[in-house]
Image (cartoon, grey):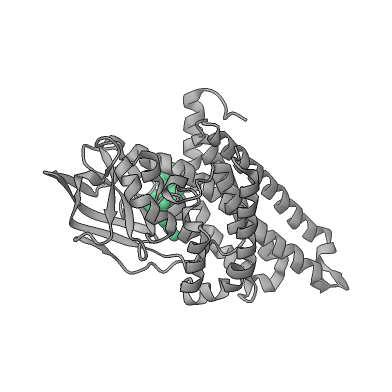
């Protein structure tokens, strides 16, 4: 439910203008230099993009899920690299603390995450534990009033820039029940970040290994009331994250399709704009239908979450459908551009590579299929619509 529709519209307009005037013109520089210019980052902080979902009492906007997906639709009309840096503070990097943090953890860290002073990161994946995240082996051994962490986390978004990591580590026996979540500040002795990974796309957004070698954190940094709650926290965070990624797919697909409509309307062959050929219109039409469906799904799931419904299966449906549709749309758009789609003079070539990630992280498409299939069989009924 939108609390204050007028304030939300002002925020949306501010972000839409910022995207158009500042982010889109900077995309090329971000991709070629693999870094977001400090001036742009400072402006992103100034307009509050790092604290969109952090509760107002801690300095954020406290957006509802519906408001957040609306903002994400706008923000991801520019390169997904921009959303990546703010996405962790609004999502997986801060939500563990928002959802399950103690009052002291919330008041200590959330204001600094909301302002962008601290960049957040979410460290679940390991070299041997990706889709099977519950098999993680990073350990957290209790030693008096501290925990001692050992292990390696892989592909951690924002690790090179992060000041704060939410780390899932094993405190008990095998499986999900033995996992706890911890807040680990970057300056802790025994924490090192590896070199940034060389990626296919989303240049300007960085991932790296995070290595813990006898890294000591206070017992008070355990998220949740007791040990063994960390996997549940991570799954709650990912349910929300999957909706936001689905919204990012919608925003990126909107940009790609708008660019394609503009290009094909001015590119002439056989004496007419190529957009007037029905076979090109089929590419546009199929893409528009999928975009419409994906957007409607995401808005519906967000509204349900705001009403307090369990949207775990809805979120997986949204991520699966929107990310796969986004991939198909990217492919059709490149096709409609012809040779120009394969050449990096136009953003579509970059978007084609950038959006490939959406089908992989925060649970691959196959894992979403498993979650949905298992969920349907377990509940013996369909997803509520
Ligand atoms: C750019 C980037 C950013 C990332 N950011 C983060 C981050 O911030 N934090 C974090 O913790 N992780 C992050 N990840 C990790 C990401 O979530 C994992 O890569 C993803 O979950 C897949 O795990 P994996 O790479 O180990 O693939 P694997 O699990 O090895 O999967 C390989 C293939 O097998 C399939 N597969 C696996 N199990 C099954 C099964 N049971 N049934 C059918 N098919 C199956 C998969 O779908 C996939 O096609 C990031 C990854 C990338 C590339």
Q: Is residue 183 left or right of residue 56?
A: left
Q: Is residue 351 above or below residue 313?
A: below
Q: Quadrant of residue 194?
A: bottom left
Q: Which residue sits furthest top?
A: 380
Q: Is residue 17 above or below residue 95?
A: below
Picture residue at 52% right of the left edge, 34% below the top = 311
Quadrant of the image containing the N terminus:
top right
Q: Nearer the viewer, residue 378 or 5?
A: 5
Residue 60 in view? yes
Picture residue at 42% right of the left edge, 60% below the top = 116
Residue 37 in view? no
Image position, residue 304 (x, y; %): 57, 34
Image position, residue 131 (x, y; %): 39, 46
Quadrant of the image containing the C terminus:
top right
Picture residue at 58% right of the left edge, 46% below the top = 67
Numbered label tally: 0
Q: Which residue sits furthest left?
A: 144
Image position, residue 4 (x, y; %): 61, 43
Image position, residue 29 (x, y; %): 54, 76
Picture residue at 29% right of the left edge, 50% below the top = 183
Q: Quadrant of residue 135?
A: top left
Q: Is residue 304 above or below residue 168?
A: above
Q: Is residue 42 left or right of residue 282?
A: left
Q: Which residue sits furthest right?
A: 271
């Amino acid at each position: 439910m939108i609390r204050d529709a007028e304030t939300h519209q002002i925020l949306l307009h501010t972000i839409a203008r910022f995207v158009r005037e500042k982010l889109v013109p900077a995309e090329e520089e971000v991709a070629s230099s693999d870094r977001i210019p400090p001036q742009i980052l400072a402006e992103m902080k100034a307009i509050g993009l790092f604290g969109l979902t952090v509760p107002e009492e801690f300095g954020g906007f406290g957006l509802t899920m519906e408001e957040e997906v609306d903002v994400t639709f706008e923000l991801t009309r520019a390169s997904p690299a921009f959303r990546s840096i703010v996405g962790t503070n609004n999502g997986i990097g801060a939500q563990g603390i928002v959802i399950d943090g103690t009052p002291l953890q919330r008041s200590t860290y959330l204001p600094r995450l909301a302002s962008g002073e601290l960049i957040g990161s979410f460290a679940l994946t390991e070299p041997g534990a990706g889709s099977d995240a519950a098999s993680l082996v990073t350990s957290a051994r209790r030693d008096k009033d501290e925990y001692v962490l050992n292990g390696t986390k892989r592909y951690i978004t924002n690790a090179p820039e992060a000041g704060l990591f939410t780390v899932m580590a094993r405190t008990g026996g095998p499986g999900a029940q033995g996992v706890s979540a911890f807040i680990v500040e970057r300056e802790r002795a025994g924490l090192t970040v590896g070199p940034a990974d060389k990626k296919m796309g989303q240049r300007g957004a960085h991932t790296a290994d995070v290595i813990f070698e006898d890294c000591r954190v206070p017992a008070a940094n355990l998220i949740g009331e007791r040990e063994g709650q960390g996997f549940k926290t991570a799954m709650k965070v990912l349910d929300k994250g999957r909706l936001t990624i689905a919204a990012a797919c919608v925003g990126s697909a909107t940009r790609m399709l708008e660019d394609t409509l503009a290009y094909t309307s001015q590119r002439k062959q056989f004496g007419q704009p190529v957009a007037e050929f029905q076979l090109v219109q089929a590419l546009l039409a199929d893409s528009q239908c999928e975009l419409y469906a994906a957007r409607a799904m995401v808005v519906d799931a967000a509204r349900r979450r705001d009403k307090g419904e369990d949207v775990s299966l809805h979120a997986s449906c949204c991520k699966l459908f929107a990310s796969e549709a986004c991939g198909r749309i990217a492919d059709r758009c490149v096709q409609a551009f012809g040779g120009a789609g394969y050449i990096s003079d136009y953003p579509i070539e970059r978007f084609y590579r950038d959006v490939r990630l959406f089908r992989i992280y925060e649970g691959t498409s196959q894992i979403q299929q498993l979650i949905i299939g298992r969920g349907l069989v377990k509940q013996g009924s369909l997803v509520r619509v």
